Image (cartoon, rainbow, N blue to C red):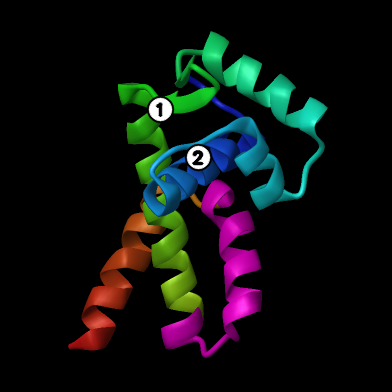
Amino acid sequence: MAIRESGEDYLETILIIKNRKGYVRAVDIAEELGYSKPSISRAVSILKQSGFIDIENGHIHLTEIGRERAEEIYHRHTVIRRFFVEILGVGEKTAELDACRTEHALSDETFEKLQLYIENYKK
């Protein structure tokens, strides 16, 4: 199922909040991303309609497909950030921002080569 870059950011954020707090509410996403509550409500509605999340008693839960996609995005993010910091020497804040943008733009082939490069670089 196709999802836009902004939807990927929301899924990744939901995963991060869930791992940190144990639960996720729309207000948590708004605080984390610095977006307005109406923007969050719209995005949450789209993600729910697309089958990526469920909502129960005000708590947002990733569906199986939503969790898989969120974990994939988060993995790409962490690998790219690590490359920027550990290999290129980019500062943490800059690496975090750049990784967030880059995770969406890299092809699967390029990402796989980047992962291999990191693994071989450590040897």
Q: Are marks 2 and 1 in contact (CB under 8 Å)?
A: yes
Q: Secondary structure at mark 2?
A: helix
Q: Is residue 95 above or below residue 103?
A: below
Residue 24 appears at what percent x and percent y? 50, 36
Location of the C terminus (image quadrant): bottom left
The three-letter code of the residue at mark 1 reads Leu
Determine the residue positioned at 50% across, 39% down: 14
| Residue 9: quadrant of the picture | top right
Return the residue nearer the eye: 55 or 87.
Answer: 55
Look at 54% across and 15% down and name the residue there: 48
Percent coordinates x, y for residue 121 in the rendering: 28, 85
Give the percent coordinates (x, y) of residue 57.
50, 17
- State the image coordinates of residue 98 (x, y, percent, origin top left): 63, 66
At 64% from the left edge and 15% from the top edge, which residue is drawn?
45
Number of the label disc, if any, that sits on residue 114: none
Q: Which residues are magenta?
A: 85-105
The verdict on residue 14 being magenta is no
Q: Residues within 10 Å of mark 2 (few under 14, many from 20)?
A: many
Element type at mark 1: strand
Q: Earlier in the sequence, mark 2 or mark 1?
A: 2
Quick check: 123 left or right of 118? left
Residue occupied by mark 2: 14
Of residues 86 and 9, the one drawn nearer to the viewer in this rendering = 9
Q: Residue at x 49, y 82 (%)?
A: 85
Q: Quadrant of residue 6?
A: top right
Decide: is 85 above or below 99. Answer: below
Count of numbered circles on the image: 2
- The tag on residue 62 is 1
CA gap between label 2 and label 1 equals 8 Å
